[in-house]
């Protein structure tokens, strides 16, 4: 898609039509690069299992699960399969002639939800090849083993999770992993060159002027309120929302999306901003093209999330915990990767590309995006090379670590 180099597309197009991960299974795809998230998700399994135990099970009809921000599939299918297995565990008879078998389990429906630009075809292909996704389960399963009983029906819904997407009180378990930090839109004042809040000199709000970061904070609050109100309507009483997303530690200053002393570590930190500067210095794009691009990501504080949950009023908090400096990749693997600066740079840059390229390409075209990632890789390689002789600095270069927030909510019984 060749775009004119005007740098104004982010202002004029609806962002939710542009956001997606890179589709397919090619070298830049989320399917390949989501392996980093997959490692972190696997570590969540005990907490997911615990959350499934908290669901108030339906007395009749199907049990419905939904993934909000499923992307192209592999990770989502893995954790949906895990949830389904955990649900089946709750129907295992503990006594009598069916002891150890799943009995009277309702049919299950899993909805995979993402924005319209998502590569749902990739997801469909993966679902079609799933051995557990039997479409012919009629009635409750009696005397089957848990593996067989963990089959489920699947549905795909294209839409924004900041809106209503499912029928009223129909959902028993909602999950959203690595998705809620994406905003629905960039506040218009930040991309308007004549506005006092024009985000000049940056592609994000990390370290920006506080008034600019507060615009993002406001948008984030509106989005989270919409997410919670929409889920409040969709969840059956006693249903569980399980959300895991990138967060920040500073409760007050949103420009500190990560701690000031850790900015070199962050996914969109110094190297990301400097790659934009390189692109401008090399004459590939104008400064205005960078300035009118804003990464639509906001890392909320625990306190901001708490405030929205209280304002919504429909949920009891089961768990709300900030996991600071969580390693997405085990420490020893990261240390090993850092010994090979060029391949590490390719890997890390491609990992970011899998998430950010579609919006960057929509803003400034494929060619300029390719040029950006060449420079980004160069920056990472240079930084990693400079660390080689300094083991202590390597230890501190936790580029694949971030603050994450785990939120588990239980839908209250509606008062009317
Ligand atoms: C990093 S991927 C996470 C995919 C998967 N949950 C995982 O953990 O591997 C984030 C996903 O959230 C989706 N997303 C972002 N904003 C969204 C919105 N408003 N509504 C629905 N999906 C959204 C993106 O399109 C993307 O597929």
Image (cartoon, rainbow, N blue to C red):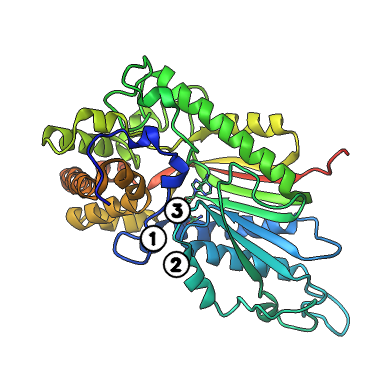
Give the Cα distance between marks 3 and 2.
Answer: 12 Å
Crowding at dot 2, Cα within 10 Å, few <14 / some 14-19 / many 20+, comes out as: some
For numbered disc 2, what is the local secondary structure? Answer: helix
In the picture of the structure, the residue carrying the numbered disc 1 is: 23
Report if the beta carbon of the residue with label 1 is closer than 8 angstroms to ligand 1: no
Residue 302 shows up from this direction: no
What residue would you read off at disc 3?
A: 117
Q: Is residue 85 left or right of residue 130?
A: right
Q: Residue at left 60%, top 77%?
A: 132
Q: Tell me which numbered mark, 3 or 1, is placed earlier along the sequence.
A: 1
The quarter of the displayed image where residue 135 is located:
bottom right
What is the crowding at mark 1: few (fewer than 14 residues within 10 Å), some, or many (at least 20)?
many
Q: Is mark 3 within 8 Å of ligand 1?
A: yes
Residue 260: mark in rendering: none
Q: Quadrant of residue 209?
A: top left
Q: Tag on residue 122?
A: 2
Q: CA distance from mark 3 to mark 1?
A: 9 Å
């Amino acid at each position: 898609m060749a775009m004119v180099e005007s740098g104004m597309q982010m202002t004029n197009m609806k962002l939710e039509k542009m956001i997606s991960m890179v589709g397919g299974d090619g070298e830049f795809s989320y399917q390949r690069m989501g392996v980093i998230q997959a490692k972190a998700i696997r570590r969540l399994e005990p907490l997911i299992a615990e959350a499934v135990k908290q669901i108030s099970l339906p007395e009749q009809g199907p049990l419905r699960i939904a993934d909000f921000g499923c992307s192209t599939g592999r990770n989502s299918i893995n954790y949906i399969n895990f949830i389904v297995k955990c649900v089946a565990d709750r129907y295992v008879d503990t006594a009598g002639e069916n002891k150890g078998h799943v009995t009277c389990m309702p049919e299950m429906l899993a909805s995979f939800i993402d924005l319209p630009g998502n590569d749902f075809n990739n997801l469909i292909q993966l679902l079609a090849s799933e051995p557990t996704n039997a479409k012919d389960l009629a009635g409750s399963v009696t005397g089957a083993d848990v593996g067989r009983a963990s089959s489920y029906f699947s549905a795909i819904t294209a839409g924004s999770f900041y809106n209503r997407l499912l029928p009223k009180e129909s959902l028993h378990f909602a999950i959203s992993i690595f998705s809620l930090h994406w905003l629905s839109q960039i506040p218009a004042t930040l991309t308007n060159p004549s506005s006092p809040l024009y985000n000049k000199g940056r592609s994000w709000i990390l370290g920006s002027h506080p008034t600019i970061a507060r615009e993002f904070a406001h948008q984030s609050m509106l989005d989270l309120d919409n997410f919670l109100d929409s889920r409040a309507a969709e969840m059956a009483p006693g249903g569980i929302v399980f959300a895991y997303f990138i967060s920040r530690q500073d409760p007050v200053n949103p420009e500190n999306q990560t701690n000031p002393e850790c900015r070199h570590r962050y996914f969109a930190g110094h190297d990301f901003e400097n790659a934009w500067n390189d692109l401008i210095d090399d004459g590939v794009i104008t400064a205005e093209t960078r300035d009118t691009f804003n990464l639509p990501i906001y890392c909320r504080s625990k306190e901001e999330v708490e405030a929205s949950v209280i304002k919504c009023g429909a949920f009891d908090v089961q768990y709300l915990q900030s996991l600071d400096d969580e390693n997405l990749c085990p420490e020893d693997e990261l240390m090993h990767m850092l010994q090979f600066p060029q391949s590490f740079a390719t890997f890390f840059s491609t990992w970011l590309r899998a998430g950010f390229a579609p919006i960057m390409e929509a803003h400034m075209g494929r060619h300029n995006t390719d040029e950006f990632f060449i420079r980004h890789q160069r920056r990472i390689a240079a930084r990693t090379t400079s660390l080689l002789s300094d083991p202590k600095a390597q230890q501190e270069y936790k580029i694949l670590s971030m603050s994450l927030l785990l939120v588990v909510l239980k839908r209250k019984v509606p008062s009317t």
